[in-house]
């Protein structure tokens, strides 16, 4: 079994495109940006732009909300904690590395 | 026995780790605890997603007192038993019919592929409905699958050469074997991504990615630090004192190393860029670390010569 090569797209998504890509409502996306759960840039015209990596972040938000019945503020806390754990685990791996 | 539950389908109570007499509260508590442990966003192990779905399925059935009663009465095929069947009559007919009773209810389609990948159906319910219930069916729409992470242990040689490695994982469709391309010069802690091989997306959304976190296995000869390699270089006292040229094993094969005269234990001889390669940039170095070794037993000649040396030499390694 092989695996697909991934093209790294650097193109940002605007609010509409992001909502479509994640199957969510633009209002919900705006709310999550306001809660700081999603990262977005705002251009001069005030429009929100999302890095493609935020699609995966949104999916995680949806899964956590669906899996645990969390509200969106709590999801924000959980995703922050999970990210911090990931950083700590990476540091731990680094520290455990054989060698000097 | 032919009519009993199949071994590959675990009992829902067993899955949640509760006795059949558990209260609804016990069931909910067990589910919440297990869900927190195995949720694919909390547990990045590739097996966690299947376990989570199994737990969710068990909870789905046991949390509703009515479906729980039917599950208790009719077993794993309860969904195929019509609503008005009397449990007692069912048990009697089942005991009489034996294998035929178990086989008749299973139709085509249905549950193929859930977790085990053994082509079993689960009483006519559709896997997508069920997964939708877990991740997609509450107004969430299609959701991309979670990323997964697992460790990949490589030998120094594999990290040096790169290449391909077959890795077998327990996945949503049973065991699957993945061909992983290992880039030459990969180091401990780096992640190799297999796009689309992570958790399954719901309702046609793309799958997550699978990451292999590389760990370089301890090696009998090489110690690894980042891309640098360290090897021991044992020398006889006279080799270290007089200087010599010795063969050192490197991942590229044997290399001749010039040992300068007057080399002591602890000195590192660097073989530039003979460590692990770097895909973009300079390779690491290989360091041969000198360790002076004396013969455990001296021959008469050696003893005589060492004594002679001790008499004529004024060298004192402890003098400051």
Image (spheres, coloured by chain):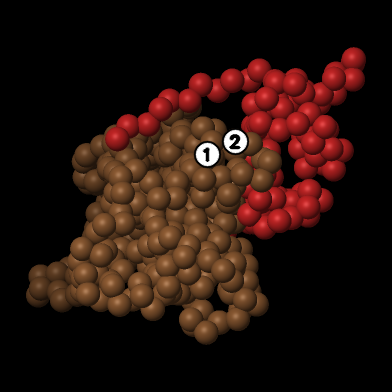
**Which residue does the image show at 77% across and 23% down from the upper left?**
A15
Instruction: Please determine if labels 2 and 1 lie on a single subunit.
Output: yes
The colour assigned to chain B within the rendered structure: brown
What residue occupies the far top of the structure in this picture? A45
SS state under label 2 = loop
Percent position (x, y) of residue A14?
75, 20
The residue closer to the viewer here, B275 or B295, is: B275
Cα gap from disc 2 to disc 1, whole angstroms: 7 Å
Residue B191 appearing in the image:
no
**Which residue does the image show at 69% across and 50% down from the upper left?**
A65
What residue occupies the far left of the structure in this picture? B300
Side of B108 where B279 appears, left or right: right
Query: From what the image shows, is residue A74 above or below residue B176?
Result: below
Query: From what the image shows, is residue B45 above or below residue B11?
Result: above
Side of A59 where B177 appears, left or right: left
Q: Quadrant of the N terminus of chain B?
A: bottom left
Residue B112 appearing in the image:
yes
Percent position (x, y) of residue B176?
31, 45
Q: Quadrant of the C terminus of chain B?
A: bottom right
Q: Which mark is residue B142?
A: 2
Q: Which mark is residue B201?
A: 1
The residue closer to the viewer here, B235 or B83, is: B83
- Please state which of the two labelled residues, at mark 2 or mark 1, is closer to the viewer: 2
Percent position (x, y) of residue B224?
41, 51
The residue closer to the viewer here, B225 or A55, is: A55
Q: Which mark is residue B122?
A: none
- Dots 2, 1 in contact, CB < 8 A: yes
The residue closer to the viewer here, B122 or B86, is: B86
User: Which chain contains the residue that carries disc 1?
Assistant: B
**Which residue does the image show at 50% across and 37% down from the upper left?**
B207
């Amino acid at each position: 079994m092989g695996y697909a090569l991934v093209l790294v797209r650097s193109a940002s998504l605007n609010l509409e495109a992001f909502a479509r890509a994640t199957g969510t409502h633009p209002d919900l996306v705006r709310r999550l940006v306001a809660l700081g759960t999603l990262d977005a840039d705002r251009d001069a015209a005030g429009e929100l732009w999302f890095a493609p990596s935020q699609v995966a972040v949104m999916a995680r938000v949806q899964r956590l909300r669906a899996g645990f019945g969390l509200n969106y503020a709590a999801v924000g806390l959980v995703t922050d904690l999970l990210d911090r754990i990931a950083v700590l685990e990476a540091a731990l791996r680094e520290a455990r590395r054989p060698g000097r | 026995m032919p009519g009993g539950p199949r071994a590959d389908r675990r009992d829902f109570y067993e899955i949640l780790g509760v006795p059949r007499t558990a209260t609804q509260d016990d069931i909910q508590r067990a589910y919440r605890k297990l869900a927190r442990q195995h949720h694919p966003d909390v547990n990045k192990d590739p097996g966690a997603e299947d376990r989570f779905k199994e737990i969710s399925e068990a909870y789905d059935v046991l949390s509703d007192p009515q479906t729980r009663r039917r599950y208790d009465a009719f077993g794993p095929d309860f969904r195929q038993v019509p609503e008005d069947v009397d449990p007692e009559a069912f048990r009697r007919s089942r005991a009489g019919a034996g294998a035929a009773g178990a086989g008749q209810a299973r139709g085509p389609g249905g549950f193929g592929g859930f977790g085990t990948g053994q082509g079993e159906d689960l009483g006519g319910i559709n896997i997508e409905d069920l997964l939708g219930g877990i991740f997609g069916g509450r107004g969430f729409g299609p959701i991309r699958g979670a990323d997964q992470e697992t460790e990949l242990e490589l030998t120094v040689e594999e990290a040096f050469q790169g290449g391909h490695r077959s890795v077998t994982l327990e996945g949503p469709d049973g065991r699957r074997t993945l061909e992983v391309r290992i880039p030459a010069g990969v180091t401990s802690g780096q992640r190799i991504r297999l796009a689309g091989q992570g958790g399954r997306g719901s309702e046609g959304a793309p799958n997550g990615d699978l990451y292999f976190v590389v760990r370089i296995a301890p090696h009998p000869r090489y110690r690894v630090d980042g891309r640098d390699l360290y090897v021991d270089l044992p020398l006889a006292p006279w080799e270290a004192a007089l200087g010599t040229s010795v063969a050192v094993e490197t991942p590229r094969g044997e290399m001749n190393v010039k040992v300068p005269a007057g080399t002591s234990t602890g000195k590192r001889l660097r073989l530039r860029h003979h460590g692990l390669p770097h895909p973009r940039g300079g390779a690491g170095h290989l360091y041969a670390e000198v360790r002076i070794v004396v013969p455990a037993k001296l021959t008469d000649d050696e003893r005589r010569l060492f004594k002679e040396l001790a008499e004529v030499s004024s060298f004192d390694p402890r003098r400051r």
